[in-house]
Image (spheres, helix red, strand yellow):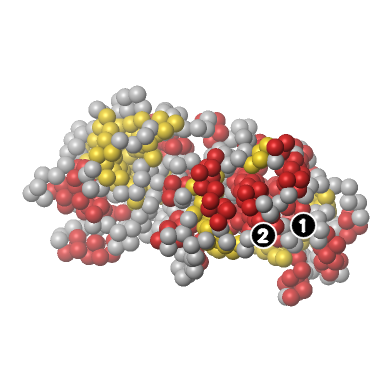
Amino acid sequence: MCGIIGYVGQRPLKEILLNGLKRLEYRGYDSAGIAVQHDGSVSMVKVKGKIRHLERRIASMDLSGTVGIAHTRWATHGEPSDVNAHPHTGCGRRLAIVHNGIIENYQSLRTLLLGRGHKFITETDTEVMAHLVEEHLDDEHNHSLEEAVRLALLEVDGTYGIAVIDARHPGMLVAARRGSPLVLGIGKEDYFIGSDTAAFAEHTRDIIHLNDDELAVLTTDGYVVKTLQDERLNPEVEKITWELDQIEKGGFDHFMLKEIHEQSQTVQDAMRGRVRPESVEVKLGGLQDHQELLVQAKRIIFTSCGTSWHASLIGRRLIEDFVRVPVEVEYASEFRYAQPIFTPDTLLITVSQSGETADTLAALQLAREEGGPALGVVNVVGSTIARETDAGVYLHAGPEIGVASTKAFTSQVTVLGLIALLMARLRGTLSKKKCKGILAEMIRLPGKIRQILDSSDDIERLAEHFDGAGNALYLGRGYSFPVALEGALKLKEISYIHAEGYPAAEMKHGPIALIDDDMPVVILAPGDHIYDKVVSNIEEIRARKGRILAVATEGNDSIAELADWVVYVPKTLDCFYPLLTVIPLQLLAYYVAVRRGCDIDQPRNLAKSVTVE
Ligand code: AGP
């Protein structure tokens, strides 16, 4: 997704802006650009391609100054090109603006501005805002940059996170947000703006999250935060809670591999301070003052996207098994345009790693309009979804940089298990003894995950069997069906091999026609209550010469006679097998993609956080 970094201060401007963009590379982009205000003018350079191309282009340029902005673009309106890259400017070339989000009414504004003599040079929606701000700067009212930006934004429908500089306002940067995240960084004598804290975390840990319809003015003398209605605010300065090296690779070849290997730690962190098996207690601070929502809910709706949707499917089974409340799981992109039925005792739970996914946020806002209570299960602290729900539980998984989500998935499932157990305890649907046993097993999971990760070489060797594969099938039943979906998504999104997750028993209703000796089949076969049925499915596939990789429980020697290859995981409770069986599938996708020479951390066409429709 697009990235923004802005700076006001005396430090080397070009270096701060370029390094800030590099910290945001993981978000996925197709072009990059920079603008600096100095000596009564604005210099702007932008290129299609990677930041290193921009760096080469400006290497010999004098871009000194005290204020500048920079941007990485993930195209939404207008193809990736030099001219469509941000920043954008108006007719007079005296201002520069960078923008994340989508201007819904840009066509009508463009027509209006063309009618008033403006000339456009790009296909982007963002350029419209540049001309609007320019109009308010150039009219007879002698508006300040802050006033011009505010007036322009009052004409805009849609979402934005913007940063603006202008030749006639030396040392000043104006930023504003609606629906696309922006964070201020408060230095000792300088100030930053970023689409996320990674852009400037090496310079300051003091941050302010801008809320929707808020605007910030940064100058070398300080900063001001206001509403779009010009009301001055006094926002709390928060601290960044994670260390910078958490966004470095830590010796691994890719962020994705690092994050796969972090999972014994991150699953533990998801439980830290929240699980007390001896007292059979689950303590979720974020829900402490909202437990009535857990007790009163007669119907629960999960809404999420992608991997988070797969985690939600597991959350559904956990809650239905432990709490005996009906649960529905909705794709947010579908839910937001449906006409869902909310009753006062319907509880919405949004699951999102980034907390900024546009579809999930829109689904949440739909529920809020209906007056429904909503919880968030989110990783990014202070993200929009986290702030727009009534309450929630953070994953504490640290920044997830790899576009393919891995540690967030296992942390989401862990947190959803804690929420299910807390609900069960509050509603008395699980005996103390049963709950104690579940919690006792839960705290053993990080060690079991570590055990699987320690045998990752075995999985690396299996990747060669996918050489040349054009398709793959992932099969599972019960708690393992969402894991089959997740394993298939991992393979698809980083190796570009088409893979389909399917309920194992559904094979006979059509997909079994696909089975032949060219089709690798990955089947989840843990020693759970439905294992014998899965064995029948394996037999059906063998009879049709399918090549089978089974994920099974250690000690199960018989499955080695049925499958071509077997990866073992430690024994656990049925409900916790997803936290173990997903690890080999993550590693398999990773090693297959490495063998295919794919871009592991920034797969083609994908972005880490899809903040547009
Ligand atoms: C998962 O590997 C993908 N990157 C994608 O499906 C992702 O899970 C989805 O976009 C939802 O993102 P979120 O969890 O940040 O809302």
Asked if residue 148 lies left or right of residue 457, the reply is left
The image position of residue 337, as x and y in percent, is: 45, 68
Q: What's the residue type where badge 2 is placed?
A: Arg
Q: Secondary structure at mark 1?
A: strand
Residue at the (75%, 65%) spot, across then down:
504
Quarter occupied by residue 397:
top right
Is residue 103 visible in the rendered image? The answer is yes
Q: What's the residue type where badge 1 is placed?
A: Leu
Residue pointed to by mark 1: 524
The image position of residue 511, as x and y in percent, is: 72, 72
The image position of residue 91, as x and y in percent, is: 19, 52
Residue at the (65%, 62%) spot, across then down:
498
Report the Cα–Cα distance between label 2 and label 1: 26 Å
Name the residue at the top extreme: 188
Quarter occupied by residue 223:
top left
The image position of residue 265, as x and y in percent, is: 66, 36
Question: Closer to the observer: label 2 or label 1?
Answer: 2
Q: Secondary structure at mark 2?
A: loop
Query: Toward the viewer: 32 or 480?
Result: 480
Residue at the (40%, 43%) spot, across then down:
195
**541 w.r.t. 239: above or below:** below
Is residue 121 visible in the rendered image? The answer is no
**269 w.r.t. 572: above or below:** above
Rendered-image quadrant of the C terminus: bottom left
Please count the marks in the image.
2
Asked if residue 488 lies left or right of residue 155, the reply is right
Residue at the (48%, 62%) spot, across then down:
344
**318 w.r.t. 274: above or below:** below
Query: Toward the viewer: 52 or 185?
Result: 185
Residue pointed to by mark 2: 324
